[in-house]
Image (spheres, grey):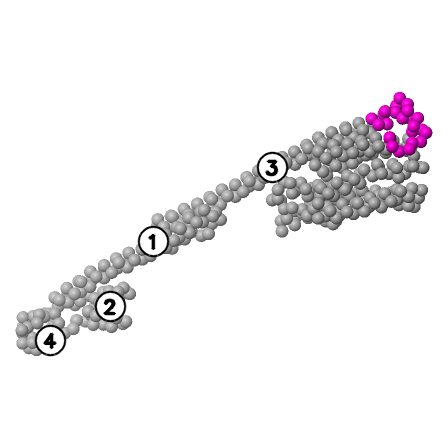
Amino acid sequence: MGDHGEMARRDADWGPLGWWLRLTAPQTPPASAWFEARERARRGRLVSVLLLAFLAIEVAALWLYVVVDDDHPLMKVALLVALAVAGAAVALNRIGEVAWSGALLVALACLPAVGIPATAIGGQLDVLHLGSFYLLAGSVLVAGSVLPPLSVFPVAAINSGAVVALLALMPRTAALSAVLASNNGPQAYAGPIALQVVVALIAYLWATSTLDALRRADRAEEIAALERREVERAHEVEEGVQELLTVHVRLANGDFSARVPPVRNAPLWRIGVSLNTLVARFARLAEAERALAQSQVETRRLAAALVARRMGLPAPWPNPTGAPLDEVIAALSGAAPSAPPASPIPPERSAPSSAEHGDSLYPRLPYWDRPSQS
């Protein structure tokens, strides 16, 4: 969802060209992608914009040479081929082949080199064509924008070779031959070639400085993201430590129902799980200790009741508490284990008279506690 929102925001930054970018530009990588992937996407978007400009120029030129000036059939063919090359560049750019689409875009920028012989009247090069050689410098700027920086030098060399080849090999008019034969003749060669060299150097320095600036900005964004993650991690640790401290305080106060809730920090959560297990075991031990203490109290009370009964006094039987000792108390007191007596001290059973046993030595002891007589 965040990546689609970022793509929509970038398309909106281009204003009316957003629809064209959605049709022709490669997919925008997520913000977490490598710098090379994001740089390739940036060049792809630039290629899309430049392709739209070249398509508009080619369509206007084709209309010009078809409707207004139809004396140059070779130029019509060249423009149709250029439109086909632009379509192929659009398709390659859409599927992410930015390098190939950029190379085709540079080839489209070299259209003046094709237009010179295509528009030559009678196939002869004229003085009017000398200005077209300077237009080839635009392909060097395009190469510096959409291709690696070093690509500007091969493009400048190819353009310089095209200038020399056209001036040397094409048939020339008398006016151009006179210019080349004069003292200003070398300028026809030196001017376009010098411009290629200068533009190539400037384009190289501009492209490399732009890449360096983008890399520095990318590193700054990565550092900022790392700092944000570090702050969030510190907050998670602080929050988890506070939860653990709260549970320790409750345990110190004897509250064994305290448990560590799930915390966002994974290491602290593992400690919390271990602490919860330990607390559960301590709770069981505390319960067993309470049961043992209660059994000890009931045992002392039962012993006191037995002593009182042996002495013929009312036996203060302990009340049922659910402990295992209840069955012993029930057996001794004569009550059913499942129905403990309502009164804490059951009535003492009346002992038989001494006449029944023919003995008056134990007038106060119950008959079951008297020693047997031989």
Q: Name the image quarter holding residue 119.
A: top right
Q: Earlier in the sequence, mark 3 or mark 4?
A: 3
Amino acid carrying label 1: it is Phe
Query: Closer to the observer: label 3 or label 4?
Result: 3
Q: Earlier in the sequence, mark 1 or mark 2?
A: 1
Are there few (<14), some (14-19), or many (20+) residues within 10 Å of tag 2? some
* Residue 184 picture location, percent across and down: 88, 23
Which stretch appears magenta? 167-190
Amino acid carrying label 2: it is Glu
Q: Which residue is mark 3?
A: 219
In space, the residues marked 1 and 2 are separated at their CA atoms by: 28 Å
Q: Secondary structure at mark 1?
A: helix
Amino acid carrying label 3: it is Arg
Q: Secondary structure at mark 2?
A: helix
* Residue 239 picture location, percent across and down: 47, 46
Q: Name the image quarter holding residue 331.
A: bottom left
Disc assigned to residue 282: 1
323 or 66: nearer the viewer: 66
Q: Which residue is mark 2?
A: 327
Are there few (<14), some (14-19), or many (20+) residues within 10 Å of tag 3? few
In space, the residues marked 4 and 2 are separated at their CA atoms by: 27 Å
CB under 8 Å between callouts 1 and 2? no
Q: Give the quarter of the figure containing the C terminus.
A: bottom left
Q: Is residue 246 above or below residue 184?
A: below
Q: Secondary structure at mark 3?
A: helix
